Amino acid sequence: MAGEVLDIVLMFLKAFAVGGAICTIAQIIINMTDITAGKILVYFMLAGVVLTAVGAYQPLVDFAGAGATVPISGFGYLLANGAIKGAERGFFYAVTGALSSASAGVTAAVVFSFLASLLFKAHTKPN
């Protein structure tokens, strides 16, 4: 029992450390450069794709779990991983594999964003 609790705590610590490190890198880039947040998101997603393509992101996912798959770089990992698995079946599946692997997450984001827009009234932030 105590061993299981320790394993769970360790899993949470690893996820928090890796996810926090990814977010810290993004925040440092935001603070130290004039790069817009949108460009940073694209760069991190592309980094996830490239790191997956060279085989460097999977060990991070195996180590940190959600700490590596939840940030935007994890979305790039998901797209690349789906394309790689689909490519084993042919070119058409390489294209559709990326889309099908990410479809559940994108659908959830759209649905929950829509529900949030129904519950809350948007307003601009005063300067």
Image (spheres, rainbow, N blue to C red):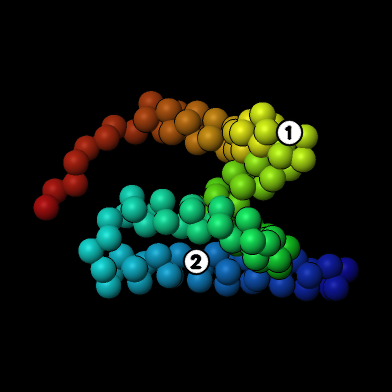
Image label count:
2
N-term mark: 1 or 2: 2
Instruction: Examine the image and state in which quarter residue 32 appears.
Output: bottom left
User: Which residue in the rendered view is the most extreme toward the left?
Assistant: 127
Residue at 43 percent across and 70 percent down: it is: 24
Considering the numbered disc 1 on the image, is that residue within a helix, a strand or a loop?
loop
- Whether residue 100 sits left or right of residue 6 in the image: it is left
Does 71 appear above or below 111? below
Mark 2 surroundings within 10 Å by alpha-carbon count, few (fewer than 14), some (14 through 19), many (20 or more): some
Residue 80 point in image, percent of width and height? 61, 47
Mark 1 surroundings within 10 Å by alpha-carbon count, few (fewer than 14), some (14 through 19), many (20 or more): few
Q: Is residue 85 visible?
A: yes
Q: What residue type is labelled 2?
A: Ile
Does 38 appear above or below 2? above
Front residue (pair 95, 2):
95
User: Which residue in the rendered view is the most extreme toward the front?
Assistant: 91
Residue position for label 2: 22
Front residue (pair 25, 98):
98
Considering the numbered disc 2 on the image, is that residue within a helix, a strand or a loop?
helix
Residue position for label 1: 90
Q: Is residue 104 visible?
A: no
Quarter of the image with the N terminus is: bottom right
Nearest-to-viewer mark from 1 and 2: 1
Residue 73 point in image, percent of width and height? 52, 55
Residue 17 point in image, percent of width and height? 57, 72
* Labels 1 & 2 near each other (Cβ < 8 A): no
- Whether residue 34 sits left or right of residue 6 in the image: it is left
